[in-house]
Amino acid sequence: MLRFDPHNVRPFLDDSAVDALWPRVEAAHNALLNKTGTGNDYLGWIDMVNDPNDALLEDVSALAAEIRANADVFLSIGIGGSYLGAKAVVQALTPYFGGSGPEILFAGHHMSGAYMRELLAYLEGKSVYVNVISKSGTTLEPALAFRFIRQWLEANFDDADQRIIVTTDPEKGALNELRKEHPYRKYIIPDDVGGRFSVLTPVGLLPIAVAGIDIHSLFYGAVAQAKALKVASRDNDALTYAALRYLLLEGQYDAEVFATFEPSLSGMGGWWQQLMGESEGKELKGLFPASVQYSTDLHSLGQYMQEGQRILIETFLMAEDDGGDLEVPSSAANLDGLDYLNGKTYTHINRKAYEGTAKAHTEGGVPNMTLWLDRINANAIGEAIYFFEHAVGVTGYLMGVNPFNQPGVEAYKKEMFSLLGKPA
Ligand code: PA5
């Protein structure tokens, strides 16, 4: 069960502001669930959790088991929504060191030639499976990476076509053209699910399952959260989160910082950044989303958080049980002066760092809220994914934008393709 704690917003916002906004919050929630708002042809991510496709989950799990049995490396090629969700969940739910099964690597999320050269060298002699993920099938970064990787696979494996899985549009795009010549296995990205809402489709599910994560539990965490958020009551935490973010944006605040004290959760910050930024940042509106990893970043950005321009709000993602119940050992001479921590756990110390930070930031003028997972497992991550997706849909509608398009990402592509001489 998730727990949302907004009490550090109270000093900055009167409850009456939320009361006054609430009829609009309910209307936005209803527009989302009844599909009457803008962008309503991109709400397949809600249908998916209302009507789970268990056969698909089983199919993905079976292919993942085959890959886990045969691969040293599983290479996921994709960018933006075709990459960030899988990366976030894999980072959250696999061990910091070691672990079993294939190594999960990513490519096609930038255009570094040095990275590609080193990747190709690293893959030498390894059993490699590749999942190329592109809804449009036309995005340059993954298409370019896939050309290099495909040629390397064909040069190194007789069964290269069996080692490639494409995740793409039902019919359109270059990956479907390639499949006319090569019998790659394929998963479909539903038409009505945008990239940043696609982590619970095969886009995210296959890489996540190959990493050994229970995708059934992940998916059903989202299913349970969707049920919990169905009713537009004042107990609906995603609506409270959406309302507070909107009211703060309407006030003096311009940016929202996503912060976690557990390094494994920092990938969730990357996923969250895209979800918030692409959904809200349009028509000169939106909170600028940024993510930080504490306590590391308290020693760098912490200065700005505490004393820079007062334009920041902050959302913490925390876990009640973070798996850090490691007690501080005593030391005979206490030369390091840490005896006051004897017997305390890392979890306790990290928790006090969070509490101290939340208090200091509140006092320093940064309204902050916390979403608590009960523990860092697949179910809780699934819950958090749906929580943020639902919330951003509602905030987008409150702001009066279409939260489900991303027209702005085309501008750089147009200029880049013109400079590269791409034929019309
Ligand atoms: O959210 C989005 O739609 C984008 O981030 C896309 O996922 C990203 O641009 C990749 O697009 P595609 O999957 O078509 O290659």
Image: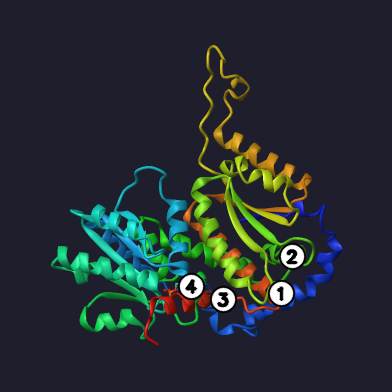
The residue indicated by pointer 4 is 195
Q: Residue at x 20, y 65 (%)?
A: 153
Tag 4: Cα neighbours inside 10 Å, few (<14), some, or many (≥20)? many
Q: Is residue 310 visible?
A: yes
Q: Are marks 2 and 4 in contact (CB under 8 Å)?
A: no
Q: Residue furthest top?
A: 333
Say if 136 sits above or below 154 in the image.
below
Q: Earlier in the sequence, mark 1 or mark 2?
A: 2
**Amino acid type, label 1:** Met
Give the x, y percent position of residue 214: 41, 58
**Amino acid type, label 3:** Gly
Query: Separation of disc 3 and disc 2 at Cα?
Result: 21 Å
Query: Separation of disc 1 and disc 4 at Cα?
Result: 21 Å
Say if 318 sits above or below 333 in the image.
below
The residue indicated by pointer 2 is 249
Q: Are marks 4 and 3 in contact (CB under 8 Å)?
A: no
**Amino acid type, label 4:** Gly
Q: Of the numbered discs in the image, which one, if any, rests on residue 399? A: 1
Q: Is residue 263 left or right of residue 65?
A: right
